[in-house]
Amino acid sequence: MAIGIILLLLVIVFLAGPRVAVDTSLRPVTLPADLDAYLAEQEARYNDITPGAEKTIIWAGEPGQKTPLSIIYL
């Protein structure tokens, strides 16, 4: 019973708390046509990247062929 009251109070405090305005709009990004070369160029500045941990693109079809949807693993 006491846990329920505490949880209810926490929810009320959370809902009554201040709201932070956040800009969720997306800005257009311009990237070069050859993304693989772009990534290699960006990482060439660093000599301490662990082999196998470099940035890579796994293309869904032909290399360089953009699709309407991208999935990004971080």
Image: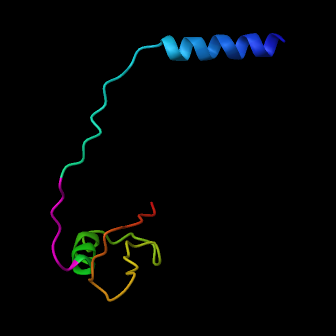
Compared to 16, does 43 lie above or below? below
Percent x, y for residue 33?
16, 77
Q: Residue at x 20, y 80 (%)?
A: 34
Specify the farthest residue to the bottom.
Answer: 62
Look at the magenta stretch and give its main secondary structure. Answer: loop
Q: Quadrant of residue 22?
A: top left
Percent x, y for residue 41?
22, 75
Specify the farthest residue to the front.
Answer: 68
Query: Residue 29 in magenta?
Result: yes
Quadrant in which the N terminus is drawn: top right
The one nearer the camera, 37 or 67, is 67
Quadrant in which the C terminus is drawn: bottom left
The one nearer the camera, 36 or 23, is 23
Task: Specify the segment rendered in magenta.
Answer: 28-34
Total marks in image: 0
Q: Quadrant of residue 66?
A: bottom left
The one nearer the camera, 33 or 24, is 24
Specify the farthest residue to the right.
Answer: 1
Q: Residue at x 17, y 67 (%)?
A: 31
Percent x, y for residue 5?
74, 10
- 47 to the left or right of 29: right
Q: Residue at x 27, y 82 (%)?
A: 65
Percent x, y for residue 3?
79, 15
Compared to 29, does 11 lie above or below? above
